[in-house]
Amino acid sequence: MSSETSSRNGISPQQQIALLVFENLAEGVIFTDAGGTILAVNSGFTRITGYAAEEVIGRNPRVLQSGAQERDFYEEMWRTLKAAGRWRGEIINRRKSGELYPELLSISAVRNAEGDITNYIGVFSDLSERLAQERAVREMRERLDLALDAGGVGTWRWEPGSGRLECDERACELIAGSQNNPPPTFEALLDRIPIYERPRVMDAFMRPTRRQLAFRAEFRVVLPDGADRHLVARARPHCGETDGVCRVVGVIWDVTERYLREREIRELNATLERRVEERTADLQAAVAELESFSYSVAHDLRAPLRGLDGFSRILIEDYGDRLDEDGRHHLQRIRAASQRLDRLIDNLLKLSRISQSPMERVPVNLGGMAREVALALQEEQPQRAAEFAIERQLRAVGDPLLLRALLENLLGNAWKYSSRKAQARIAFGATRIEEETVYFVRDNGDGFDMAHAAKLFAPFQRLHGTDEFAGTGVGLASVARTVARHGGRVWAEAAKGEGATFFFTLPDRS
């Protein structure tokens, strides 16, 4: 606005500037007469209190009172205003919405040439946000203090330039053993660290500090009483933009118990390794003895058995006509018993080799293996009426020799126990049960009573007499041991006279 226009409107340029400032102040401004009647307010007043100018002009500022201050508070305010001409302080007022808010209020008295008070000007700012921030900072500091205290963590500050070191009570206690004699400098701290560790600790602190990088250092201090303490320090350098001084602010905590536990575990592991080596040597010696025993059984024990069987056969062939029926029967029983014992020894040796022999894990075509076993069984007894149903593309990962022996035992059992059926039906296949491949061998033979199923896979346990079906009771024990070595499971389901199904799993560990 030009000076000419301003003059026509009765407002000088200086007054125009004052009005602009009055209207655009971020603080709220209230202008009253000497009696306290509001004459004018600015937009800041409206923004803070919610009252429009027309709602308060002509009224007393008491419209903003919240009731949070006592009567004495306002009486003291007015005494100060009349005596000193100004008052400044914090007060709780109420917005138009009814919300209470804190404000910082400054009131100045305006006097005329004779010194009489003609008006009052109040300037105030909303403290809500500032107080909320201060409250949040206090709460955060309280939570931090609680966390540091609960974790036994101390805080420290170091100025690399001067070497000055400061620490709180907890940090001083950790470093010095008490709060009364803390190391005042980083060099004094190094004096408490064993000589052989000082270069490593200095490098851990100094190198990242020069690069202004956060770091972590673990070190040992020797307390005045001679006790050792293992500590961990974490810190971050900060360089002032104004003074250029670099300070390192960090935390420190005690890890002595962890260190002692780790040392104890290391010692225990060393002791355990020695014990494992000793036990391994004992086991190797036992295995060697077992192998020697197996050799003795295979050669020394079986030789007289074969002699017994051979001489019994000679007696029958050469002198059978001189013996009566009972004599020949007894000789036949002797031969049968010696042959059965020979087979039993042979099966025991096979069972022991399952546990001792090294294993390999390669892809195996179980379907093809099963067809070869079935063909061999049929060639031994071509007169039998039997039907084999073997799934193709049945593959697994395992030891080929052990898995072939497993199939020979399971399919051989199915062949044997279905021999009294006019038409034997034997199946080999696989199914999925809970994301696991389960293989099975099923027959329509004699089956067994599930009440005795727990005995199936133990050596020498038979659910049928030798007068019904031949056997030594070792085959299923071999199956169980083979499956266990592969990390799988084996079980059976059956009903007396209705056949049996044997299940097994072979985890894929290729």
Image: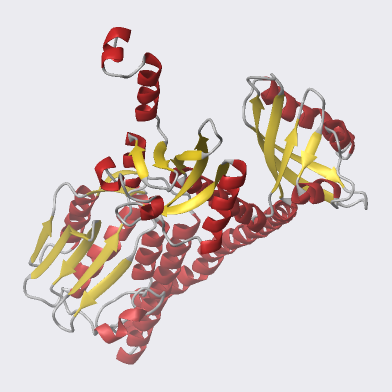
Compared with 36, 313 (above or below) is below
Compared with 297, 120 (above or below) is above
Q: Residue at x 58, y 52 (%)?
A: 79
Quarter holding residue 63: bottom left
Q: Position of residue 196 (x, y in %)?
A: 86, 33
Q: Quadrant of the N terminus?
A: top left
Q: Residue at x 10, y 76 (%)?
A: 421
Specify whether residue 314 is in view. no
Q: Position of residue 115 (x, y in %)?
A: 56, 36
Q: Position of residue 13 (x, y in %)?
A: 37, 14
Q: Would residue 380 be found to the left or right of residue 269 on screen?
A: left
Q: Residue at x 41, y 56 (%)?
A: 65
Q: Nearer the viewer, residue 351 or 93?
A: 93
Total numbered circles? 0
Q: Would residue 370 be found to the left or right of residue 238 on screen?
A: left
Please, which colouring scheme is shown? secondary structure
Specify whether residue 228 is in view. yes
Residue found farthest to the front? 114
Residue found farthest to the right? 225
Q: Would residue 421 be found to the left or right of residue 186 on screen?
A: left
Q: Residue at x 83, y 32 (%)?
A: 186
Q: Would residue 72 be found to the left or right of residue 225 on screen?
A: left
Q: Nearer the viewer, residue 85 or 473?
A: 85
Q: Quadrant of the C terminus?
A: top left
Q: Nearer the viewer, residue 430 or 91?
A: 91
Q: Nearer the viewer, residue 267 or 377?
A: 267
Q: Position of residue 301 (x, y in %)?
A: 53, 69
Quarter holding residue 163: top right
Quarter holding residue 496: bottom left
